[in-house]
């Protein structure tokens, strides 16, 4: 995966994957593998995936994000998806992609608040 | 009033459409040839026709009103001459169409009523007819044939011009409808992070979509964590409407906001269940007040009445 | 800005291009930003199907007119194996586990007109149109 497309930052025991631009399928799968590896490596308890910049979230993306949540849950971390934009949320729901059972928040700030953290000193994972 | 050539966002009039219209008017290559054949003639009498034309316009109060400014009048006259000359130039392609559409848009923008627009065209045709009659005295058949071609082209032009009038009207209507819709469904911020969306009246798919869009944008701009959607004012909730509501709730959830739907009458709730809508997927509370209280609870608010405030109620028993 | 455009679908990168071109083309009309996203999403679904099931194909984008209304036509075609059971593919079978099959019923919901033609061994063509209001 091209790390520049979705750099992973670490804030205490939370990993933040901030998607920078439209990800290709391989990037998404790569991100999933990286996150799982990082959760193990750092014994992270939470993962936040920030998709603010994405203008389309289709069924593949939704499936992969769900995989990330499922896999990280198996190794003890919760996943929160943040930054879904109004148009994207609407399209997803029309398509039937409700991400049922997954935690969501408006943006990174709210996502961190959900975990009980404030945006502070994050470093590259 | 200053007269400016404005760039108009033209509706894409594809080549296909142009061809279809010409076919319908039976405007063919021989018409093009005929019009081109009188181009030289047109140049000769252009000024005279324009002169007559403006004398006619200025003799009527409503059209005169548009040309009180001499600078405007001069500009318009030269444009009219250009317009007139273009009729016999022989190129009636996309550029021609673009030109006609632009002119129509300008007239519409300036506020020239359709009746005046038609009246002007009528005057044109009649002026030309007179001159054609004079020019082809020895060959009346040719005059008729040329005029026939000119008529087809004129109606082609008029069709384009009227399109722009309609296009502009529709844009205005759309804008007004948008405004009405926004007004009729305000999304209210009751407390920080708490939005209220009271829906009144019938919901169709279009309105449902607009409501959802408004709601989602509101969630983002107000950073809402809870949304109360009140449907007390919605007379009937069928499967479609119920599905729209569910979708709105799910979309809001993707943005981190929980929703509470209030005001669903028991009978309607029954119908929804019968229709197979999973009410477990959405939180519903009987009435608006309870819904707001529930929302406040979710957000960690506790409403406490202060002692000594307001009307003193007489103690029970007295 | 063209009114007709073909995008070859041969790799993942083409999916991104297809979405972008679709959005660009549709933005020539009076679609809201929300509708543009619907269009881009539908394009994403059908072009991904091409890649996944046929390996390669083509996306044809076109602005269309019908009387007074205008819209965008999206045709995704491939010469892949074809869909064995179209009825099943068009049935709403998404589950909460997230396995969504071909995403066809979903794409249909996003658009105004939807048609699919598929023959075993010949390929599949999905045609969708969205009209501006």
Image (tube, coloured by chain):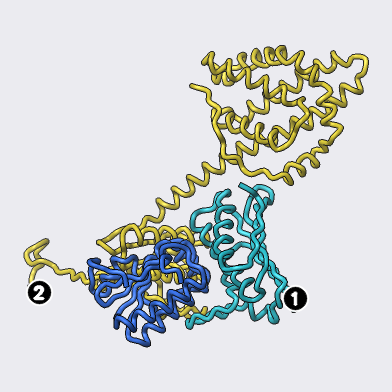
Chain colours: A blue, B yellow, C cyan
Q: Which residue is mark 1?
A: C119
Whether residue A97 is visible to the viewer of this picture, yes or no, is yes
Q: Which residue is mark 2?
A: B316
Tags 2 and 1 on a common chain: no
- Residue at the spot 51% in from the left edge and 71% down from the top edge: A25
Quadrant hosting residue B93? top right
Pinpoint residue C104: horizontal percent, then vertical percent: 61, 73
So how many labels did they put on this image?
2
- Residue C129, compared with residue B57, is above or below; it is below
Within-10-Å neighbours for mark 1: few <14, some 14–19, many 20+: some
The label number, if any, that marks residue B95 in the structure image = none
Q: Are marks 2 and 1 in contact (CB under 8 Å)?
A: no
Real-space Cα separation, disc 2 to disc 1, in angstroms: 82 Å
Judging depth in this view, the residue of B185 and B251 nearest the camera is B251
On the picture, is C114 further left or further right than A69?
A: right
On the picture, is B32 further left or further right than B229?
A: right
- Residue B138, compared with residue B28, is above or below; it is above
Whether residue C115 is visible to the viewer of this picture, yes or no, is no
| SS state under label 2 | loop
Judging depth in this view, the residue of A65 and B165 nearest the camera is A65
Within-10-Å neighbours for mark 2: few <14, some 14–19, many 20+: few
Judging depth in this view, the residue of B36 and B290 nearest the camera is B36
- Residue B21, compared with residue C116, is above or below; it is above
Pinpoint residue B263: horizontal percent, then vertical percent: 37, 69
């Amino acid at each position: 995966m091209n790390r520049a497309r979705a750099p992973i930052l670490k804030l205490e025991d939370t990993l933040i994957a901030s998607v920078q631009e439209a990800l290709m399928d391989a990037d998404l799968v790569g991100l999933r593998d990286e996150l799982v590896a990082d959760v193990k490596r750092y014994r992270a308890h939470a993962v936040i995936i920030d998709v603010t910049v994405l203008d389309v979230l289709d069924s593949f993306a939704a499936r992969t994000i769900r995989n990330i949540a499922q896999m990280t849950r198996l190794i003890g971390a919760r996943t929160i998806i943040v930054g879904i934009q109004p148009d994207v949320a609407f399209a997803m729901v029309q398509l039937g992609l409700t991400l049922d059972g997954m935690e969501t928040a408006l943006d990174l700030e709210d996502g961190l608040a959900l975990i009980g953290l404030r945006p502070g000193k994050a470093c590259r994972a | 009033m200053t007269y400016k050539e404005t760039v108009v966002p033209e509706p894409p009039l594809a080549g296909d459409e142009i061809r279809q219209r010409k076919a319908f008017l039976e405007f063919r290559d021989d018409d093009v040839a005929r019009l081109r054949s009188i181009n030289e003639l047109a140049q000769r009498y252009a000024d005279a026709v324009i002169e007559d034309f403006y004398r006619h316009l200025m003799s009527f109060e409503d059209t005169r009103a548009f040309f009180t400014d001499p600078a405007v009048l001069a500009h318009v006259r030269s444009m009219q001459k250009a317009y007139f000359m273009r009729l016999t130039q022989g190129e009636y392609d996309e550029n021609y169409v673009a030109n006609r559409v632009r002119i129509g848009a300008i007239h519409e923008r300036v506020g020239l009523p359709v009746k005046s627009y038609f009246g002007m065209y009528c005057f044109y045709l009649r002026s030309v007819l007179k001159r054609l009659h004079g020019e082809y005295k020895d060959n009346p058949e040719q005059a008729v044939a040329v005029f026939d071609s000119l008529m087809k082209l004129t109606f082609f032009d008029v069709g384009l011009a009227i399109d722009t009038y309609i296009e502009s009207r529709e844009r205005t209507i759309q804008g007004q409808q948008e405004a009405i819709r926004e007004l009729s469904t305000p999304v209210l911020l009751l407390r920080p992070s708490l939005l209220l969306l009271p829906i009144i009246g019938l919901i169709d798919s279009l309105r449902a979509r607009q409501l959802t869009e408004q709601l989602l944008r509101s969630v983002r701009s107000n950073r809402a964590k809870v949304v109360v959607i009140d449907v007390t004012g919605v007379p009937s909730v069928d499967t479609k409407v119920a599905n729209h509501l569910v979708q709105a709730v799910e979309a809001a959830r993707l943005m981190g906001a929980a929703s509470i739907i209030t005001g669903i009458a028991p009978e309607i709730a029954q119908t929804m269940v019968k229709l197979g809508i999973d009410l477990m997927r959405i939180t519903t509370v009987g009435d608006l007040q309870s819904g707001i209280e529930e929302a406040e609870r979710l957000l960690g608010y506790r409403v406490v009445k202060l002692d000594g405030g307001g009307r003193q109620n007489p103690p029970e028993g007295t | 800005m063209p009114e007709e455009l073909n995008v070859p679908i041969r790799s993942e990168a083409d999916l991104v291009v297809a979405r972008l071109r679709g959005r660009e083309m549709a933005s020539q009309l009076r679609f809201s930003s929300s509708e543009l996203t619907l269009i881009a999403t539908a394009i994403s679904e059908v072009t991904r199907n091409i890649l996944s099931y046929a390996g390669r194909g083509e996306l044809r984008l076109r602005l269309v007119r019908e009387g007074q209304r205008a819209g965008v036509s999206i045709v995704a075609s491939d010469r892949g194996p074809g869909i064995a059971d179209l009825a099943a593919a068009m049935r709403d079978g998404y589950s909460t586990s997230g396995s969504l099959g071909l995403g066809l019923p979903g794409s249909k919901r996003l658009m105004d007109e939807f048609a699919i033609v598929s023959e075993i061994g010949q390929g599949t063509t999905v045609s969708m149109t969205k009209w501006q209001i």
